[in-house]
Amino acid sequence: MTFPTTVPQTAAASPLALPIVETFHSIQGEGLWAGTSAWFIRLAGCDVGCPWCDTKPSWNPKRHPLRTLEDLVAEARSANPAIVVITGGEPLMHDLSALTGQLKEAGLETHLETSGAHPFSGTFDWVTFSPKRFKPPHASIYAHASELKVVIGDEVDLAWAEQQATQVSSTVAKLLQPEWETPGSRDRVLAYVLDHPQWRVSLQTHKFLGVQ
């Protein structure tokens, strides 16, 4: 089978096609699944506006081709990963029900990485919820979170993390991740976790390894 198949750039996203920035096979670099073989589907479109975002080219969905769900699923199966990670951009800007349904039918374990800024959709085995102060989460996300992962740049982010932690289940893993480009964020996170043992440190291990 040949990949990828695209539909016209001017077409609107539909249940059968989504705007895709890229797909690739790597390891999951962050959170509790770090080190796991993962096939990433990076959806285009984001209105959260994090100033330190390292995937800003994904923000405008019109700049990226639409790809059919059929081909996305076939490509993921061909890669034979342990997990498929749907990320962005902000993936919940799109209805993920059809895509995740087809991935599950193909026998693929499916994970989501989201800020939760839009209504929840889709069926997932794991949801990494990474709320951002720049666009508060939609209320529907909290019941679906498997892990809470908050990016920390300054002290205000720590207060935000604690506020968000009160809204997820007590069984949800809670992680603080230093913002890669912010001086002092690593030491700030380490000091906080040492004083607040309910939190764990999440690192962007793929950046340390020099892989995508």
Image (spheres, helix red, strand yellow):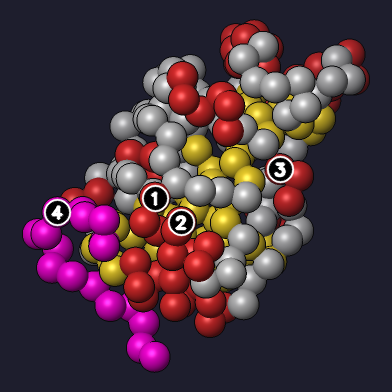
According to the image, label 1 marks what residue? Answer: 97
* The quarter of the displayed image where residue 35 is located: bottom right
In which quadrant of the rendered image does the C terminus lie?
A: bottom right
What residue is pinned by disc 2? 100
Residue 41 numbered mark, or none: none
Above or below residue 136? Residue 16 is: below
Q: Which residue is mark 3?
A: 31
Q: Nearer the viewer, mark 2 or mark 4?
A: 2
Sequence order check, earlier mark of 3 and 1: 3
Work out how far the residue at label 3 is from the one at label 2, CA to CA, in angstroms: 21 Å
Q: Are marks 2 and 4 in contact (CB under 8 Å)?
A: no
Name the foreground residue: 205 vs 100. 100
Viewer-proximal residue among 3 and 152: 3
Give the residue type at disc 4. Ala
Q: Earlier in the sequence, mark 2 or mark 4?
A: 4
Image coordinates of residue 106 in percent, x first then y, are 52, 72
Q: Quadrant of residue 165?
A: top right
Which type of secondary structure does the marked residue at label 2 adopt?
helix
Q: Which residues are magenta?
A: 1-17
